Amino acid sequence: MRRYPRQSHRVLQVMTRLLVPFMILFGLYVQFHGDYGPGGGFQAGVIIAAGLILYGLVFGIQRARSVCPPSWARVMMSLGVLIYAGTGAVTMLLGAHLLDYDVLAHDPLHGQHWGIFAVELGVGVTVTGVMISLFYGFSSARNSIDRKNSGLPSDVEASSTVEHPQ
Amino acid sequence: METFIVGVLLSFLVIIAIGIIVLRDLLAAVILLGVYSLIAAGAFVVMDAVDVAFTEAAVGAGISTILYLGALRFTTDRQKPRGHDSLPALLFVVLTGALLIYGTLDMPHYGSATSPAQTHEQVAVRFLEVSGDEVGPPNIVTSVLASYRGYDTLGETVVVFAAGIAVMSLLGLRRRRPQQDISDDERAES
């Protein structure tokens, strides 16, 4: 695999390489600092997904898929909802109302802290997964690649392969 | 002064919206949509709604622009010339817009001390005073969003999840074709 695939976009590629780690770091900051400043799971998920999508736009979908396979994004979509709803289930199992975080720790304030942390994490994970899946959905609508991950019989997509018949 | 700044920002929004309608270059229209969201975020900051502004900037100016750009890769960047403008459609749009503006007339003014959020059982005041002892985080928006209204936010998360599922069932669940001879890089170079 070439380090910088497309010669014509060298500047974009170098800049993307520089920027994406900081975008993801900023997304994590927004995620975990939402209690103290503006931000939270939703914004953080969007920012992290934007970093990966930018990477995919500049370096090609294939490389983005190798960084974060579509199956991961799908798992993240449901995992976030599971974390959120699971927090509610845990509070109910501990004898309180749904999403009443007071019982999550001995001190109600600590319980609230843990609860908010968990649900914000759930929101962030879901939003990241959905945004990445959206992007993959757009890209695979006309540009379905990644042959090595495909364990399917070869005629599944045959009806829509009018562009490049083999 | 604040009213003046908000007024200027809002008139920018109108100008940009007209620009988006008039433009035939879709790439420029997408960038203008991002600018629109960024200016809207600026207006929200002036009105002290920092969390809303952050969301608008991240979602409107950030990821929507990127998703639009991703979609543009698979289309042309010129809008097809339209046929004649239909008069009933124009009337319908004007009527809907007028109704929406009419609907805002009896809303409380911005910053009004007599708005229901301020007067009705002192909701806003209660959150401001008690949330620090009840929930903890200094950012009261987070307290309300994740704790007091945690159930609503659970619903919102499920909505985002459902939207993702819907889009994937429309676009993404088509299986990859196993024999793909043109990779992304090669296609861009050709």
Image: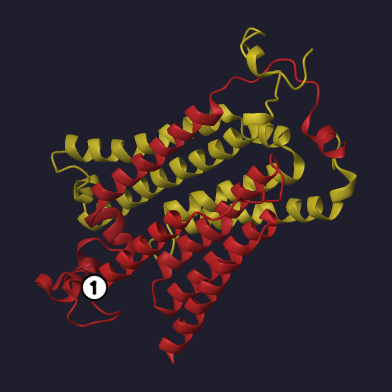
Chain colours: A yellow, B red
Q: Quadrant of the C terminus of chain A?
A: top right
Say above or below: A25 vs B187: below
- B58 vs A87, left or right, is right
Residue at figure coordinates x 77%, y 33% from the top left? B184
> A141 and B128: which one is in front?
A141
Q: Residues within 10 Å of mark 1 (few under 14, many from 20)?
A: few
> A3 and A130: which one is in front?
A130
> B47 and A72: which one is in front?
B47
Say above or below: B63 vs B184: below
Instruction: Name the spot of residue B96 as percent of width and height, x first.
Output: 35, 60
Q: Is residue A105 visible?
A: no
> B66 and A116: which one is in front?
B66
Instruction: Name the spot of residue A17 as percent of width and height, x first.
Output: 75, 51
Question: According to the image, label 1 marks what residue?
Answer: B107
The chain containing the residue under callout 1 comes to B
Q: Is residue A119 visible?
A: yes
